[in-house]
Image (cartoon, coloured by chain):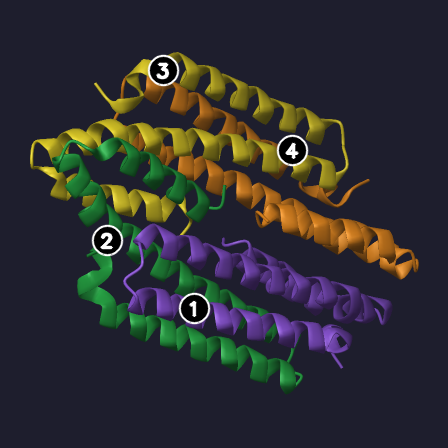
Chain colours: A orange, B yellow, C green, D purple
Amino acid sequence: MYGYAMKKDDLRARLRRIEGQVRGLQRMVDEDQYCIDILTQVNSVVAALRAVGLGLLDDHVRHCVRESIEQHEGDQKIEELVAAVARFAGR
Amino acid sequence: MYGYAMKKDDLRARLRRIEGQVRGLQRMVDEDQYCIDILTQVNSVVAALRAVGLGLLDDHVRHCVRESIEQHEGDQKIEELVAAVARFAGR
Amino acid sequence: MYGYAMKKDDLRARLRRIEGQVRGLQRMVDEDQYCIDILTQVNSVVAALRAVGLGLLDDHVRHCVRESIEQHEGDQKIEELVAAVARFAGR
Amino acid sequence: MYGYAMKKDDLRARLRRIEGQVRGLQRMVDEDQYCIDILTQVNSVVAALRAVGLGLLDDHVRHCVRESIEQHEGDQKIEELVAAVARFAGR
């Protein structure tokens, strides 16, 4: 059981909404909408995905990382967390 | 006709692939996969979307912005471009 | 003469302020201040630098890129601009 | 004693180098160097600062966060960490 387990419904709802936004982008391209308007919509989808990513990180620290530290086995989880933060922050 | 017109098929193919990746994320959540693995996949989708955004910006400069400058009407387009770059770069 | 020429004083003032902020960071480390407070200050300096970068991009489009397009020699400048935006946006 | 305590010399050396880079930027402006070259250098300084930020986060998790979890007082630290990651990742 991972950290996001109790929030699965919320997570699924967000991802379904993001899927709809990506379909909306395809419609905008089909309808030859203005490039800057499509780009604005791309930025919204990126923001929604990053909010999902941050939520996953949050649950991960509150559950997986915390538990492994409490069991004095945190080293590997901390290593993995910092690497994940680095990738998430785009470095 | 906007800048991305000649690349519509490529753009559509990328967005369809991104839609599939977002569905893949939903499956990972349904299957209770490990949070860090889901996060890694979220980062891939963000990267794919940002590549789409950069391609749109590229075409926009090469066509819309260039044409309006050639017709000595570039001011508003340049204003709009810089604002779009600022939002895209996340400031 | 480049695009930022008329704004040199403003640019210099911003960079001097950023230099002062970086010295402030060194002081925070010397004084053993709390890591999260130092990180918050690092984020401020990054934001100040990115504002400088965006200003440079803005002037570059309004002057160098515009002029080379008006002289029908825009291709290379547009290529270079898009590459600069990509690096600035962190891809 | 904070997490970065044993790495203070390394942190100071990095910040001194960044201070030198910011002075280099001022020189580039004084010498009217090309905007895109200055922007490239701005990007380098941003990258160096973000590496410092990531190092601070790393030490913070390995020490402050870990210790407060081991003492069963992790809640506030975890809250603070997630907020710091969000700001660092630019959301």
Could you say whether the residue bearing mark 1 is in a helix, strand or loop? helix
- Distance from disc 2 to disc 4, alpha carbons, whole Å, reads 37 Å
* Residue at x 48%, y 20% (from the top left corner): B14
For the residue marked with disc 2, what is the amino acid? Asp
Residue at position x 53%, y 24% from top?
B18
Q: Residue B69 or A33: which is nearer the viewer?
A: B69
* Residue bearing the label numbered 4: B41
**Which mark lies nearer to you, 1 or 2?**
1
Q: Looking at the image, is mark 3 or mark 2 nearer the viewer?
A: 2
Q: Is residue A8 above or below residue B63?
A: below
Q: Amino acid at mark 3?
A: Lys
| Mark 1 neighbour class, 10 Å CA radius: few under 14, some 14 to 19, many 20 or more | some
Residue D84 appears at what percent x and percent y?
A: 59, 63
Q: Is residue C21 above or below residue B18?
A: below
Assess whether mark 3 and mark 1 are in contact (beta carbons under 8 angstroms): no
As drawn, the label of residue C59 is 2
Query: Among all residues in the image, which is located at the extreme front?
Result: D31
Q: Check the image and report above or below for D67 versus B66.
A: below
User: Which residue was labeled with disc 3?
Assistant: B8
Say what amino acid the circle numbered 1 marks: Gly
Does the residue at mark 3 contact the one at mark 2 (Cβ under 8 Å)? no
Cα distance between the residues tagged 4 and 1: 39 Å
How many angstroms separate mark 3 from mark 2 (CA)? 31 Å
Q: Are marks 4 and 1 on the same chain?
A: no
